[in-house]
Amino acid sequence: MNQAPVSCIPNTKMSKARKVIDEAKEIQNPELDLADKGIAHFEEMPGLFNMVNITRLTLSHNKIQAVPPGLANMVNLEILNLFNNQIEELPTSLSSMPKLRILNVGMNRLDSLPRGFGAFPVLEVLDLTYNNLNETVLPGNFFKLETLRALYLGDNDFETLSPEIGQLKNLQILVLRENDLVSLPKEIGELHRLRELHIQGNRLTVLPPELGQLDLISNKSVLKMENNPWVAPIADQLQVGVSHVVDYIRSDTYKFVYNRHMQTETPPPPRTNDKRMKISRRQQS
């Protein structure tokens, strides 16, 4: 008599993922696309961690809750896409992956990052958009990611940004939109390669004058800063255009305005975004 399979994973799910994996093994495809396959557990992808030839793994739009440390065995992985799952924490082993250049864990349920997360040797793009992260949960070495070119922290809960941001010397894109930021550190002016800065939808009233040292208004640059409660002089310049804001914050007049504002220690504007209903906050039923 045939016995039922020991695995508690439904056969239909298992076979859907297994079919893709078997095909990839057969043709030695270095790219494995398992997006939107209803996967909830890595057990539904038998033999995955032994596929050391894989360079790109796409697991976006699934229902994965936990990432096992064994994923780091895929030592040739360069691109890992876990966007839009239900992941609550990541294994420390991820940051030991020797070739990982792009990591997308946006649209998950992360409220912390593992210790030592900043140890990735060659990471260039890190997407943490739409999670539950803030300045208190970043590991101590987070800003040691010196190879980083793009950092996406939009739709999280940051109120401040560490002065250590200035260590990310290769950063070209920094996305901080839709947080609760009440200030930016002057060290942001040390990011001389920065060409895109997204700070819209925060609680910012002033900008550090050091921001004026950056090239954010050339043809290939992007500066998004709408939907903040700016002080009147910045708000007035913004109505004319972003380039006028940058010119203004480079002026001695603005430095006087900025210093006076900082000395008055005005309380930060109240939160206007109610984030309690974010998908990333909802617990599974």
Image (cartoon, rainbow, N blue to C red):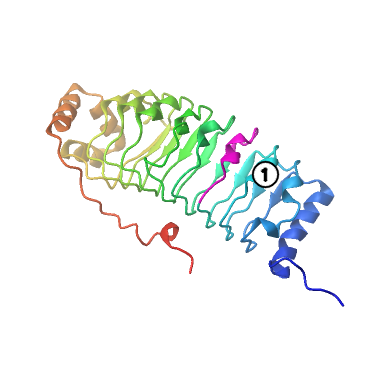
SS under mark 1 = strand
For this rendering, which residue is in front, 174 or 254?
Answer: 174
* Residue 92 on the magenta span: yes
Residue 150 appears at what percent x and percent y? 49, 36
Packing grade of label 1 (10 A; few <14, some 14-19, many >=20) is some
Q: Is residue 177 left or right of residue 27?
A: left
Residue 246 appears at what percent x and percent y? 29, 30
Q: How many marks?
A: 1
For this rendering, which residue is in front, 208 or 1?
Answer: 1
x 60%, y 40%: residue: 93
Q: Quadrant of the N terminus?
A: bottom right
x 73%, y 50%: residue: 48
Task: Give, as a single range, the part of the protein colored magenta.
Answer: 89-102
> What residue occupies the far bottom of the structure in this picture?
1
Residue 210 appears at what percent x and percent y? 30, 25
- Looking at the rendered structure, the kind of residue marked 1 is Arg
Compared to residue 281, the image places residue 257 above or below, namely above
* Residue 181 on the magenta span: no
x 55%, y 33%: residue: 124
Q: Is residue 255 left or right of residue 166?
A: left
User: Circle 1 sits on which residue?
Assistant: 56
